[in-house]
Amino acid sequence: MTDAIYLDCNATTPLKPAVIAAMSAVLGEVGNASSVHRFGRVARRMVEDSRAEVAQLVGAAPRQVIFTSGGTEANSQVLAGETRRVLVSAIEHDSVLKAADAEFIPVDSDGRVDVAALETMLATSGCDTTIAVMLANNETGVIQPIADVARIAKAHRAHVHCDAVQAAGKIAIDMAALGVDTLTLSAHKFGGPQGVGALIVRDGVEIAPLLVGGRQEHGRRAGTENVAAIHGFGVAAALARRELDGMNTLAQRRDAMEAQLRQATPAVVFSSGAARLPNTSCIAMPGVSAETQVMAFDLAGIAVSAGSACSSGKIQPSHVLQAMGVAPALAGSAIRVSAGWSTTAAQTEKFVEQWIGLWARLGARDGRSAPAA
Ligand code: PLP
């Protein structure tokens, strides 16, 4: 896989070398973080050091961090079994969409949540409401106006949950400035291990445990802590904070890549008018299905993903593009290209080369041109 090019970092990122080194050292050790003997105390220290690092990544205090098995669990802990009215943006990840019986807040054609529509929806409910809006979308990279959402929500004393899984490590996050009550993180989206994440809870907010049967995480999440993974999460969080400036380079490369594709082919770049994560492009090659593109790029040694969900072997149109009002045919030809800390300029150039070649072979042959987005 050495020559293969991985451009699917919104699905998962490679572990950073320092994370591998740190976790490898811990895997050889024994110790339950709840044990009182020295082995347990060493494990506890590691968990608490990581808690401090993860808290710092989002400007929170360590006591506010609950370690979970990942983003899905953290989202579920807030939303599953919610008895209040639940409003979620129409472009949320499935772990939010499927967690509760929710009403959808619409988005505009760039994929930004419609704050005015939220205000109207809230006018018919009082403080018995939970709102979930993600900080950045996993398919388009669009950064959402969370501070505005929170301001309106607070006027109605609603709970605001923010899934920041895709934003962490790519843009700076200050939970207090965002004004949200709960926030979700996942380590594997920024160079940490899979299977570990966190729910960050504002002081004074009551959150019931999803998993019961132990007093871990101050009674808010039962189960023996995954010490090695939590340690890796902490190292990844510290690195992400230090390396945030490097994201400007990714953004410049991404913009140059999109410009080249648009110049050489009728590529349609979604949400290019909105503030986006520095690493994400959602691009359609009109007339060529996303499935065909993903396979063709894979054969050329490049991993990208379809801007759509795969369920029971069938590619479903992306609910995100659908919510943005993109025509089904165009949405069906959209792929997601997501770079990361390990992506080089040469790899991005190779992708551009392959895209242009693919368009020449499959797209341009019957003289197609781009339909409107
Ligand atoms: N939320 C968003 C926006 C995601 O992109 C993902 C993963 O793709 C998740 C939640 C789920 O996170 P995890 O894989 O840690 O369960």
Image (tube, rainbow, N blue to C red):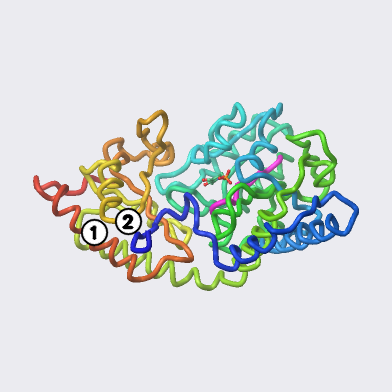
Give the answer, above or below, for where 238 lies relative to 164.
Answer: below
State the residue position of label 1.
354
Q: Does 160 appear in magenta? A: yes
Q: Main secondary structure of the magenta part?
A: strand
Which three-letter amino acid code belongs to the residue tagged 2?
Ile
Residue at 44% x, 44% y: name it: 108
Whether residue 128 sits left or right of residue 357 in the image: it is right
Q: Which residue is drawn at 50% across and 37% down?
A: 90
Ligand 1: quadrant of the figure: top right
Task: Verify CB contact (< 8 Å) between mark 2 and mark 1.
Answer: yes
The residue sitting at 59% across, 66% down in the picture is: 240
Instruction: Give the SS element for disc 1.
Output: helix
Q: What residue type is labelled 1?
A: Gln
Please give left or right for residue 275 compared with residue 199 in the image: left
Left or right: residue 186 versus residue 4 is: right
Identify whether 78 is placed above or below 264. above
Instruction: Identify whether 14 is placed above or below 247.
Output: above
Quarter assignment of residue 122? top right
Tag 2 residue: 302
How packed mark 2 is, by other alpha carbons closer than 10 Å (few <14, some 14-19, many 20 or more), is many
What's the CA distance linking mark 2 and mark 1? 9 Å
Quarter holding the N terminus is bottom left
Residue 370: x, y in percent?
A: 20, 48
Say whether residue 75 is magenta: no
Residue at 85%, 41% (x, y): give it.
215
Mark 2 / mark 1, whichever is N-terminal = 2
Element on which disc 2 rests: strand
Is the residue marked by circle 1 packed among few (<14), some (14-19), or many (20+) residues within 10 Å? some
Magenta residues (range): 159-166
Q: Where is residue 340 in the image (x, y as percent from the top left)?
A: 46, 62
